[in-house]
Amino acid sequence: MSDFDMMNLPDALARRVAEMGLTQPTPIQAQAIPHALNGRDVMGLAQTGTGKTAAFGIPLIARLMEEGGKPAPKTARGLILAPTRELAGQIAAVLRELTSMRVQIVVGGVSINPQIQRLAKGADILVATPGRLLDLVERRAIRLADTGFLVLDEADQMLDLGFVHALRKISELMGEDRQTMLFSATMPKQMNEIAQSYLQEPIRIEVNPPGKAADKVTQGVHFIAKAEKSALLIELLDKHRENRALVFTRTKHGADRLARALERKGFAVAAIHGDKRQGQRERALAAFKAREIRVLVATDVAARGLDIPDVKFVYNYELPNVPEAYVHRIGRTARAGKDGSAVAFCAPEEMDYLKDIQKVMKLSIPVLSGRAWEPVPDPNAKPAGGRGRGRPGAKPGGGRPGAPGTSKPSNRRRRKPKPKGPSA
């Protein structure tokens, strides 16, 4: 008998859980599911990859099964809000494994008319991104007043993406007589305001301290000049072409540019980011999961929630300017108890980002090559102790050893080159 059997789930749901191979609940599941089954509002704090979808999906389905009945046209009995199209799709896929009830998904980036047609019959569970949901409300394709269950997944990322006003509006459209579950990896100050407007006397569950990475992720950092990053990445990827690798950049253009560079070097690669059409993003993820491509270059659109099995390597080609995003990025590897490697590249201008990341994680990331870039005094500041002014930027403490265009750390002043003949 598994621990799920002790939760007194409906028989049909218990069979589905067993068929999915779920036997021992993860910490967030073990703590959240019993309270949710009892009708309590739940605020769960846990990192990605900890089993949050089942933590809210199992009790949501169980409560709907106990209620019985069918959805009225243009209504949803339960609503799940997610920040990205990819995460919404993944949630819907898991729920469809757990139940034969009508699970619908509505996201932006695709035609709205088929979604309107599907909602005409109503949904037991509707998985939605906030923007598209409000579009459908304005077109009177969906009514939320009678929705009795609400889940907000990756709520902090919804705030990061600017959905705070949409979340407030959705809350106003729903009745007060509902059960709400909110799951988040971090708890920024604005989240307390959202929690107060959405939750009623919630039970708070925290299973992973914010900033803690999975235990089996091996981390390391290369201090390297920006111009040398692509050469180092190609060198490292070339050592494990048979493994899947996820490479993160900060910008959409940077992701496309890096993917083209890797393709020219013979790598099976694709890029995903917010400017890609939904079909392109889905095809890229499907090809990555099917091992048709081995390298996926992405912005932080892929940093959360996506369960891509057997990603052995995560490369932070560009460090994120939000330190928590680093934790989510490296959480794409070492999933389901497996080992993984997270490698960061740090250029001089990213040194402050690295310091913030290490502060949040409360650790010092091991150095793989180079040496930490040292700050240089402000060139406009008055010289101290008779010494000359430093140049802007950072001292060259990093770079690949012996790589062209990099400098070894030195305390000696540079000598001017001697003239070489009359033409010098």
Image (cartoon, rainbow, N blue to C red):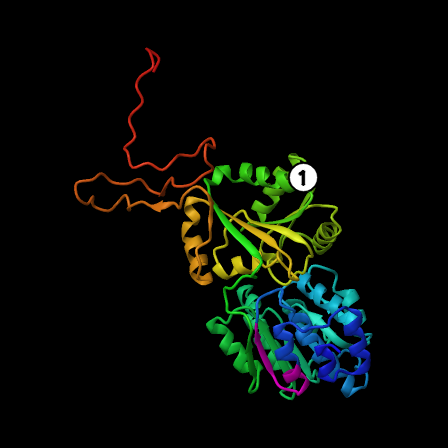
Q: Is residue 38 magenta?
A: yes
The answer to whether 375 is drawn above or below residue 307 in the figure is above
Position of 219 with respect to 151 (left or right) is left
Residue shown at 61% from the left, 74% from the top:
28
Q: Is residue 185 visible?
A: yes
**What span is in magenta?**
34-45
The answer to whether 222 is drawn above or below residue 183 in the figure is above
The residue to which callout 1 is attached is: 267
Q: Position of residue 418 (x, y in %)?
A: 30, 19
The quadrant of the rendering that contains the C terminus is top left
Q: Residues within 10 Å of mark 1 (few under 14, many from 20)?
A: some
Q: Residue furthest top?
A: 422
Q: How many marks?
A: 1
Q: Residue furthest left?
A: 386
Q: Position of residue 395 (x, y in %)?
A: 35, 41
Position of 413 with respect to 269 (left or right) is left
